Structures are given as C-alpha cells and as structure tokens.
Image: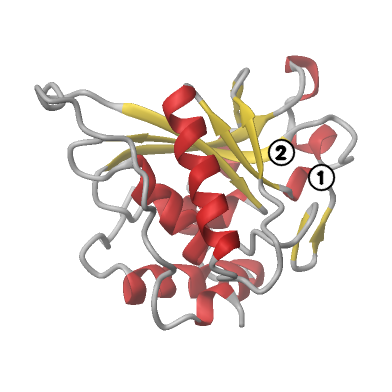
Amino acid sequence: MAIESRKEPIPAPLHDIAMPESGWEAGQHETAVFAGGCFWGVQSVFQRVKGVIQTTVGYSGGAAETADYKTVCSTETGHAEALEIVFDPAKVSYGTLLRIFFSVVHDPTQLNRQGGDIGTSYRSAIFYTDDQQKKAAEEYVKQLNAAHIFGKPIVTQIVPLETFYRGEEYHQDYAIKNPHNPYIQVCDIPKIGALQQQFPELFQEYTR
C-alpha cells in the first residue's frame, strides 16, 4: 500500500522525548533534520504541521564544497536531500514528527530511492541532534519493525547530524511556487492530502 493511500496513521511511538518537569520555556525551539526522498515533498508535509515554526530544504551527510543541487544529484557526494525543521516542542513532540515522517512523507523500506527518484541522495535518513533524538528514533524503528507495520524492514539511516547546508533559494517552498508542476501534482499533493486525512488535529494551511 502506498504511504499516501493509508486511511489511518501508523502507531504512535511508545517512547518519546519527555517534557522536562519544569516544562518547556516559552519560545523554546528544537530542530529535527529528516531525509525522505525529494526534499520538495518532505517540506510540503512538515510546513503544514501545527507546532512547526520553520522548514528549510538543503543537504546533509557530505562536505560543504559539494552541498549544491547539481553536485548532489550525482549521488556521489554523501549528501541526502534533507529538511531542517524548527519546531515548538510544547506544541508538537519529536516523536510526533517521527510518526508523520514514517506515516505520510515517504516509504522507509525503499533503499536509496523513493519511487522513480533513485540514488543515495534520495535515501531515508534521520540526522539526530542529540542522544535523546537518537534513542527516540531507534526505539521507534524497533517498534515499527517488530509490529511488521510495513511488511518489509525499515532501511532508514539514523546518524548524527554534522552539518545542515541550506539549499538554493529556488528550492525553498518549491511546491508552493510551482503548484502546477506535474511532479508536484503526482508526488507531493497526495502527501499533503494524507497528512490532512491522517492527522487532522495537526494539519494547518500554509502560505508563504
């Protein structure tokens, strides 16, 4: 079953990053970095999640001198097309972002590809920023695999974030800027619909 055709979201994580006893300070933001195929679609989903403050498409996994679209498309740089997500943990938890990532953003069982986009730059990856994110991601993958949610093992990499490199300006909000692009219509619009269907309480409209 295609990710965007699911009627219900996958199970929530059993282990999430707990809120401190004193609570989160007002205005405190956290950062998550995910890769799940073409970054246009990943951004299209997460920029519509309540509690997400800002999203930026870019590259992670390689060196600064190769962090540009043309070079990354060679699939020989080590980079993945990635999305940096700045979020308010008092409104949406890291575990909830992981749940959305695995539910509607992409197919985490496809190795080094998403559909017709083939190569390591389109791989599934979670770039964690601290040990709490690492544990939450690892525990969730174990949970989903144990429950055979996808029928095949999850191949998502869980690796430390070294550097996130902001992508070119024309890639930012690409789906908003190019709503009639056939790729956007076929690959990304259904993901937005899946988010709204599966997570109506978290869905928000997005405008630049």
Is residue 174 something one can see in this rendering? no
Separation of disc 1 and disc 2 at Cα? 7 Å
Colouring scheme, one of rainbow, by chain, secondary structure, one colour: secondary structure
The one of 157 and 26 positioned closer to us in this rendering: 157
Query: Can you say whether 140 is above or below 190 in the image?
Result: above
Q: Quadrant of the N terminus?
A: bottom right
Q: In which quarter of the image is residue 125?
A: top right
Q: Which residue is drawn at 71% across and 28% down?
A: 61
Whether the residues at callouts 1 and 2 have beta carbons within 8 Å, the answer is: yes
The one of 32 and 135 positioned closer to us in this rendering: 135
Query: Badge 1 local density, few (<14 within 10 Å), some, or many (20+)?
Result: many
Q: Residue at x 67, y 57 (%)?
A: 154
Q: Residue at x 42, y 56 (%)?
A: 99
Q: Earlier in the sequence, mark 1 or mark 2?
A: 2
x and y, in percent, of residue 136 in the image? 45, 39
x and y, in percent, of residue 189 in the image? 50, 71
x and y, in percent, of residue 206 in the image? 31, 55
x and y, in percent, of residue 45 in the image? 44, 57
Q: Residue at x 55, y 71 (%)?
A: 149
Q: Quadrant of residue 180?
A: bottom right
Q: What residue type is labelled 1?
A: Thr
- The residue that disc 2 covers is 80
Query: Can you say whether 37 is above or below 84 in the image?
Result: below
- The residue that disc 1 covers is 120
50 to the left or right of 143 = left
